Image: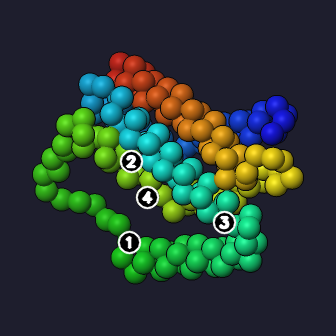
Amino acid sequence: MSLETIAAFWIVSFLMLITPGIDWTYAIAAGLRHQSVLPAVSGLVSGHLLVVVVVATLGGLIAKVPAALPVLTMIGATYFIWVGVMTLRHPAGPISGDMTVSTSPRHQFLKGFGVSGLNAKLYLIMLALLPQFTNPALRTPVAVQLMILGLIHVSNCAVIYGGVAVAAKRVLLTRPK
């Protein structure tokens, strides 16, 4: 892979990650609730690593069987329709009662891992995004190229989500207004 391709992917990954979403929400909550943000951010980053490994594996297969991509696209679209219908049928509402939050580092890690690692939208975005930056003509297998790009993405996650969590702790807790 060329340095230009790697730089272009780094920029796209960075722009994708600085857009607030569910991972940001959890990083901010961890910064506000917990003494250390490391377990929560490590969980988020590990979830992204899981997504990268799955996408690299699927991407390598899709490179060999291009007809699989439309099938995966239809599965993803069906999933999103199902989520939309379920959301309309059972909208979220206020929760009453005492909500206790576990503060163990293990729980924070697992919750962060679940937030990222079970995010279907992240899988679909990465499956659509990563292969565009690969070159099947190179001697390096597509799956390896996907892993290299994915590790760049995971590094971006660590920096951005760590920064968001620390900023929440420093700024929001000291200046709530």
Left or right of 147, for residue 24: left
In three-dimensional space, the C-alpha distance between marks 3 and 2, rounded to whole angstroms, equals 25 Å
Sort mark 3 into few (<14), some (14-19) or many (20+) by Cα contacts within 10 Å.
Answer: some
Which comes before the other along the chain, label 1 or label 3?
3
User: Residue at 30% of width from left, 25% of height from top?
Assistant: 36
Which comes before the other along the chain, label 4 or label 2?
2
In three-dimensional space, the C-alpha distance between marks 3 and 4, rounded to whole angstroms, equals 21 Å
What percent of the width, then of the height, locates residue 53?
54, 51
In three-dimensional space, the C-alpha distance between marks 4 and 2, rounded to whole angstroms, equals 8 Å
Sort mark 2 into few (<14), some (14-19) or many (20+) by Cα contacts within 10 Å.
Answer: many
Left or right of 166, for residue 60: right
What percent of the width, then of the height, locates residue 146?
67, 49
Q: Look at the numbered disc 4 and give the secondary structure of its residue.
A: loop
**Residue 158 numbered mark, or none:** none
Identity of the residue furthest to the left in this view: 98
- Indicate which label's residue lies in the foreground, 3 or 2: 3
Residue type pointed to by label 1: Pro
- Indicate which label's residue lies in the foreground, 3 or 4: 3
Residue to which mark 3 is pinned: 61
Residue to which mark 1 is pinned: 91
Residue to which mark 2 is pinned: 113
Residue type pointed to by label 3: Leu
User: Residue at 81% of width from left, 47% of height from top?
Assistant: 139
Q: Look at the numbered disc 3 and give the secondary structure of its residue.
A: helix
Residue to which mark 4 is pinned: 118
Mark yes or no: residue 63 visible. yes
- Indicate which label's residue lies in the foreground, 1 or 3: 3
In three-dimensional space, the C-alpha distance between marks 1 and 3, rounded to whole angstroms, equals 37 Å
